Amino acid sequence: MPIFANPGTDGAVMNFEQRYDNWIGGQWTPPVKGQYFENPSPITGKTFCEVARSTAEDIDLALDAAHKAAPAWGKTAVAERSLILLKIADRIEENLTQIAVAESWDNGKAVRETLAADIPLAVDHFRYFAGALRAQEGSLSQVDEDTVAYHFHEPLGVVGQIIPWNFPILMAVWKLAPALAAGNAVVLKPAEQTPASILYLISLIGDLLPDGVLNIVNGFGVEAGKPLASSNRIRKIAFTGETTTGRLIMQYASENIIPVTLELGGKSPNIFFADVMASDDGFRDRALEGFTMFALNQGEVCTCPSRALIQESIYDEFIDLAVKRTEAIKQGNPLDTDTMMGAQASNDQFEKITSYLSIGQEEGAKVLTGGEPLTLEGELAGGYYIKPTIFAGHNKMRIFQEEIFGPVLSVATFSDYADAMSIANDTLYGLGAGVWSRDGATAYRAGREIQAGRVWTNTYHDYPAHAAFGGYKASGIGRENHLMMLEHYQQTKNLLVGY
Ligand code: NAD
């Protein structure tokens, strides 16, 4: 199967700039202090571009541009704003392969995923919010004979957005599409580990929006993220990242009394009831496929099924098949379309995951497969590869309670329905969960009882734009996707009219 050429080499499908500035007011703008940081590709571990290392001064410039642009953008006719979003979607679709390769190169993820899922989903999110905007209605109610209450949706004005590195483009689009649709001007800071694919995307779509409506400022968390999140010139901060950073974001926001949307960590249980093994049919296969999704995106998914709970009576038979299936996952160069699992997104993340491989063994968990990094040859020798790993243990272990954010699955057994619910809900987090049972009533009941914002039953990891997504407990505040996200980027004006 084709291996897409590395950017910058002969035959490349796209080219990266050697140096990326910030995108402010519709222009590439160098950082005020003139500093840049090196951005390596996880595929090889080698630097392939330099990116602006921004500070509070750059955030201020971007906020100036956003404030200048926001009033006109907020008043732009709904049909016109919607059409611009549709044009953005078309432009992304026309350049899908290039963007998908850029995303894989910057993040290390398998290009078959970016081609089939990440970038098509980004296209669909722009289209969804372009349509949602047209369908949104205000309301009117009669208070009494002489008084009427109107409710209007208004944009917030200028909003800040900060995103992580695991789905750089999709996380950006999840935030940008509803915020822009709602009529806001945006300042977005990408993760320092994966800025390049977003900047490449902006180089393709930047001209479609009025200057200053969309601004991208690069840099590190404390140097660039904090001045953005703590600015008194934004009317909302939307953040996706770790729960510990989310706490800080909420503190900053409290100073300015602005709303937050927080999409944070997870430790998602995936429950396999005994009836999944009832016959060797398509259902059993689907459940096994769901099991192996812990390695999807190299396990760097906030809803990654990181805890598998298997009913005791089927454990031996099920785990035997599940381990075989896991060992069939093809690892290698993410730019090869046959590769199912690529590189971890950064060296820091690689080290964090390998430390948990040791922690699991130290606390007595049994390695059923994997348990170590994978060394590849040639150009890939410096990349960050880890074998998909399954640990068997119990829910009190750190590997069951702490977010590893890598291809590491912790497996335990349960006796009956009540036991499964008690283990599943014994976690700080409440983002994603999965239930597998042929019995519709069991699947429904468990789906309602698990304390998580998204429970997949008899399927896993679909992210349609029209399904609300977000966390219970320490996994966050607010929802993304769905019509309700438009309202999270709006404020309500009530006009009480006496006649
Ligand atoms: P992170 O919290 O370290 O960083 C996220 C972003 O915050 C980065 O852009 C970073 O520069 C910035 N940042 C860091 N410190 C900051 C500060 N003090 N002020 C302002 N900004 C700051 O998270 P990460 O390691 O990039 O991402 C992984 C995490 O994201 C995991 O916990 C994962 O579960 C979570 N995640 C959640 C969802 C969801 O939808 N719930 C989706 C994807 C990832």
Image (cartoon, rainbow, N blue to C red):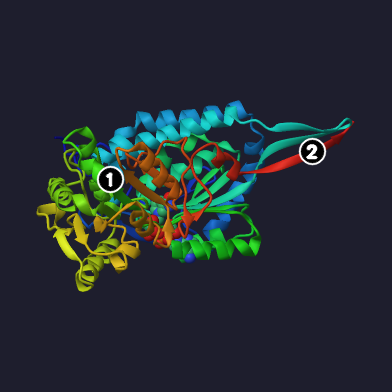
For the residue pair 432 and 222, the one nearer the viewer reads as 432
Label 2 element class: strand
Q: Position of residue 272 (x, y in %)?
A: 27, 47
Indicate the secondary structure of the residue bearing disc 1. helix
Q: Residue at x 31, y 61 (%)?
A: 404
What residue is rendered at 21% in x and 70% in y?
358
Q: Residue furthest bottom?
A: 362
In terms of image quadrants, where is residue 228? bottom right
Disc 1 marks which amino acid? Answer: Ser
Q: Quadrant of the N terminus?
A: top left
Q: Amino acid at mark 2?
A: Leu
In the image, residue 238 lies at what x, y percent?
52, 52
Ligand 1 neighbours mark 1 (CB distance < 8 Å): no
Residue placed under numbered mark 1 in the picture: 104
Q: Is 176 left or right of 17, judged from the image as shown?
A: right
- When the figure is inspected, residue 401 is found, relative to residue 208, above or below; the finding is below
Residue 61 in the image: x percent, y percent? 56, 54
**At 58% across and 49% down in the image, what residue appears?**
159
Q: Is residue 41 visible?
A: no
Residue 439 visible here: yes
Res. 278 image quadrant: top left
**Depth order, front residue of 207/417:** 417
Between the C-alphas of marks 2 and 1, the distance is 49 Å
Quarter of the rendered image showing ligand 1:
bottom left
Q: In the picture shown, does residue 161 fall above or below 3?
A: below
Q: Dot 1: few (<14), some (14–19), or many (≥20) neighbours within 10 Å?
A: many
In the displayed structure image, the side of residue 467 where residue 377 appears, left or right: left
Instruction: Find disc 2 in the rendering and name its residue.
Output: 495
**Residue reaching furthest to the left:** 377
x, y percent for residue 263: 46, 53
**Quadrant position of the C terminus in the picture:** top right
